[in-house]
Image (cartoon, grey):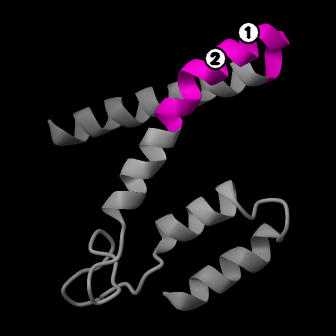
Amino acid sequence: MDRVLGEVLRAAVWDRLHMLEQEASSTDDDSVLLVARSELPRLVAGWRAVLAHHSPDLRGRCPACSSLWRPWVAPCTVWLSAYKHLVYAESMSSGRFEESAASRG
């Protein structure tokens, strides 16, 4: 049952992201503004929740990404991805960024 639920949840999220992308690229400016006003706060809240879940513990490790056998020193890939897409997307080639992130793991 968990697998089916996971598939349903993933499909719903991908569908929602696709719908938002379509709205942003194919409607008039007034409609885009309405969608942005209603959806942007929800997206920001979602990012904040995910990032809070991946905040480093007192030892500087991501508790969500770490395991007993392999501690993940912060920033984890979730924080690196957030930085890449929210802050640094235009300034650095994704290949160089991904290589530097992969070398940390």
- Look at label 1 and name its amino acid: Ser
Residue 65's x, y, as percent? 33, 73
The disc at residue 31 is: 1
Q: Secondary structure at mark 1?
A: helix
- Say left or right for 16 vs 27: left
Using the image as rendered, state which of residue 60 and residue 16 is in the foreground. 60
In this picture, which residue range is highlighted in magenta? Answer: 25-43
Using the image as rendered, state which of residue 23 and residue 35 is in the foreground. 35
In three-dimensional space, the C-alpha distance between marks 1 and 2, rounded to whole angstroms, equals 6 Å
- Say left or right for 70 vs 51: left
- For image coordinates 67% across by 75% down, the residue present is 98
Residue 90's x, y, as percent? 84, 60
- For image coordinates 36% across by 66% down, the residue present is 54
| Residue 35 on the magenta segment | yes
Which residue in the structure is indicated by mark 2?
A: 35
Please say if the residues under marks 1 and 2 sit with CB atoms less than 8 Å apart: yes
Q: Is residue 52 above or below residue 3?
A: below
- For image coordinates 60% across by 81% down, the residue present is 101
